[in-house]
């Protein structure tokens, strides 16, 4: 009885201390892990977050690139840290939805082992072909696929990525045969697409901006829910008859499980403030991304909805590791 009472008092003291802890944080530098190589979208967003939080809290927030295993190494390094707010990680749809579905034995669980703090921005995937193909619309690509006599090849930046899953879904909806050519990152796949070695690509819109401007690649449609301000001439997949393919490759900020709620909400509010800053918003849009503000609870529901949406696609494609 005395032991139980002491335990209850300890918990009560911890809960009472949480607001003060959140108010005092941070008193030392904070690490933000970017699980991908420097220069990519996740890394760019990590540095935006670090710069903003450093300015707001007058404390150093630094980015550590910790790559490997499709981001799992970086995520795991934070998931096993103390839930005190000094170790955060840039996460995305692959780390929180698709990879955990594909690999039930993953070293971390996307909700039990993490506090998913804030949605940052989503980058639409764009169906692209090379300029010499002469294809200008999605309907023309489908017609070409039906006449080709063999599956249309398409590229993505890896197995289980949004581009991969959209390609599989597009093939089924359009009633054409497609074959996936995964690449280790977007750059090599884009080079092969420009050279005509594959029929179409599904890169993130921002990653092919310069090639769209030069005419080396032609955008047919993208997966955002509305037209992107920087690319007003490119229709959405919804507009060309594929509403089921509306999605983005979204990025977020997470920390270890069991972070104090006041601290988690404080970080969430600052990310919401960051994406509304005119200079940050302009840069996000210039990179072909769309920001959105979500509360912690809304983001948790969003992750659950995304998992329910993509799990059947992943299973149908035979991507679940037994």
Image (cartoon, rainbow, N blue to C red):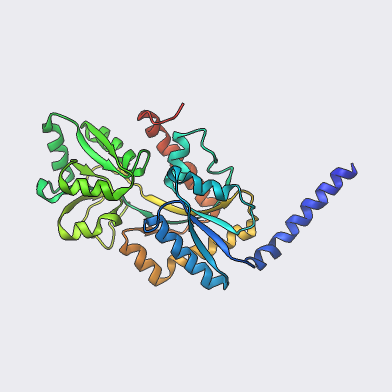
Closest to the observer, 86 or 297: 86
Q: Residue furthest right?
A: 2
Q: Is residue 45 visible?
A: yes
Closest to the observer, 197 or 203: 197
Q: Is residue 72 left or right of residue 233?
A: right
Q: Is residue 109 left or right of residue 227?
A: right
Total marks shown come to: 0
Image x and y of residue 239, in percent: 24, 48
Q: Residue furthest top?
A: 322
Q: Is residue 23 left or right of residue 105?
A: right
Closest to the observer, 160 or 170: 160
Q: Is residue 109 above or below residue 280?
A: above
Q: Is residue 237 visible?
A: no
Seen at 29% across and 55% down, the residue is: 207
Which of the 4 quarters of the picture holds residue 212?
bottom left
Seen at 48% across and 38% down, the residue is: 100
Q: Is residue 18 above or below residue 245?
A: below
Image x and y of residue 115, in percent: 57, 50
Image x and y of residue 156, in percent: 30, 43
Seen at 44% across and 65% down, the residue is: 48
Q: Is residue 289 above or below residue 155?
A: below
Image x and y of residue 204, in percent: 31, 51
Seen at 59% across and 57% down, the residue is: 264
């Amino acid at each position: 009885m005395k032991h139980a009472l002491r335990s209850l008092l300890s918990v009560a003291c911890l809960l009472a201390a949480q607001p003060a802890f959140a108010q005092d944080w941070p008193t030392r530098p904070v690490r933000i892990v970017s699980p991908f190589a420097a220069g990519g979208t996740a890394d760019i967003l990590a540095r935006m977050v670090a710069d903003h939080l450093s300015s707001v809290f007058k404390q150093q927030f630094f980015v550590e690139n910790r790559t490997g295993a499709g981001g799992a190494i970086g995520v795991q390094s934070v998931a096993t840290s103390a839930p005190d707010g000094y170790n955060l990680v840039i996460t995305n749809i692959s780390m929180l939805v698709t990879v955990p579905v594909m690999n039930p034995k993953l070293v971390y669980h996307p909700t039990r082992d993490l506090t998913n703090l804030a949605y940052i921005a989503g980058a639409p995937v764009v169906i692209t072909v090379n300029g010499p193909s002469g294809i200008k619309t999605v309907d023309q690509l489908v017609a070409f696929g039906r006449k080709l006599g063999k599956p249309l090849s398409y590229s993505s930046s890896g197995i289980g990525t949004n581009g991969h899953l959209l390609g599989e879904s597009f093939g089924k909806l359009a009633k054409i045969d497609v074959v996936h050519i995964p690449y280790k990152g977007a750059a090599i796949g884009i080079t092969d697409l420009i050279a005509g070695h594959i029929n179409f690509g599904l890169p993130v819109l921002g990653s092919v901006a310069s090639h769209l401007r030069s005419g080396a690649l032609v955008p047919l449609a993208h997966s955002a829910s509305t037209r992107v301000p920087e690319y007003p001439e490119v229709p959405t997949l919804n507009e060309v008859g594929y509403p089921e393919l509306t999605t983005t490759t979204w990025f977020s900020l997470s920390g270890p499980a069991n972070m104090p709620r006041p601290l988690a909400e404080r970080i969430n509010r600052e990310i919401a403030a960051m994406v509304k800053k005119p200079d940050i918003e302009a840069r996000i849009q210039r990179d072909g991304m769309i920001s959105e503000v979500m509360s912690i609870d809304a983001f948790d529901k969003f992750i659950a909805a995304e998992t329910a949406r993509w799990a059947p696609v992943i299973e149908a494609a035979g991507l679940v590791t037994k």
